[in-house]
Amino acid sequence: MSLTLADAIERHILALLEEHGEAALQRVEVARLYDCAPSQINYVLATRFTPERGFVTESRRGGGGYIRIVRAGRPELPQLAAALRQAAEGVSEAVAIAVVARCSASGWLGEREAQMLAAMLRRDVLALPLPERDLLRARLLAAALLSLGQGR
């Protein structure tokens, strides 16, 4: 299996997180290290270091600008459910699966629960046109998380 450029950049950032507890870097420096455009770094940050996946990213632009990435704390289910309910455009399958994975990694969901919830949120199961499908997915996920939060 060969690594894509995005995979290599992700691994680099994850290694920094593991070693230092946070990753503080400059887009230009990482782009130079991997011989790519700074926009590739932005892509990795936007797709792999998201709140849904358990990361907080702080960015400062300008000449001395930097990016700081830390792991978010354990998600609080009621707040997560409230945010999902308020998602005006609903929630995509990818975001929903990332939320389920984060809740599983945090111990809120067991492996079987996570698999079952992820299966229920798939696009082929919620066979509705957009945006109804994403709105329904957000409501289902919010209801499941609220139910879990009440049971603990």
Image (cartoon, rainbow, N blue to C red):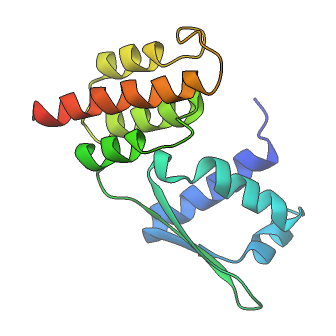
Relative placement, left or right, of 150 versus 6 is left
Q: Is residue 78 above or below residue 145?
A: below
Residue at 49% x, 36% y is 98
Relative placement, left or right, of 81 versus 19 is left
Q: Position of residue 9 (x, y in %)?
A: 71, 55
Q: Is residue 105 above or below residue 58?
A: above
Residue at 55% x, 28% y is 134
Task: Give the farthest residue toward the bottom.
Answer: 63
Q: Position of residue 4 (x, y in %)?
A: 80, 42
Residue at 56% x, 21% y is 133
Instruction: Look at the image and tell me in which quarter the N terminus lies.
Output: top right
Give residue 29's quadrant in the image.
Answer: bottom right
Instruction: Look at the image and tell me in which quarter the C terminus lies.
Output: top left
Residue at 34% x, 33% y is 142
Q: Is 50 in front, or is 129?
A: 129
The total number of labels drawn is 0
Give residue 12's quadrant in the image.
Answer: bottom right
Q: Position of residue 89 (x, y in %)?
A: 57, 39
Q: Is residue 142 above or below residue 73?
A: above
Relative placement, left or right, of 134 versus 110 is right
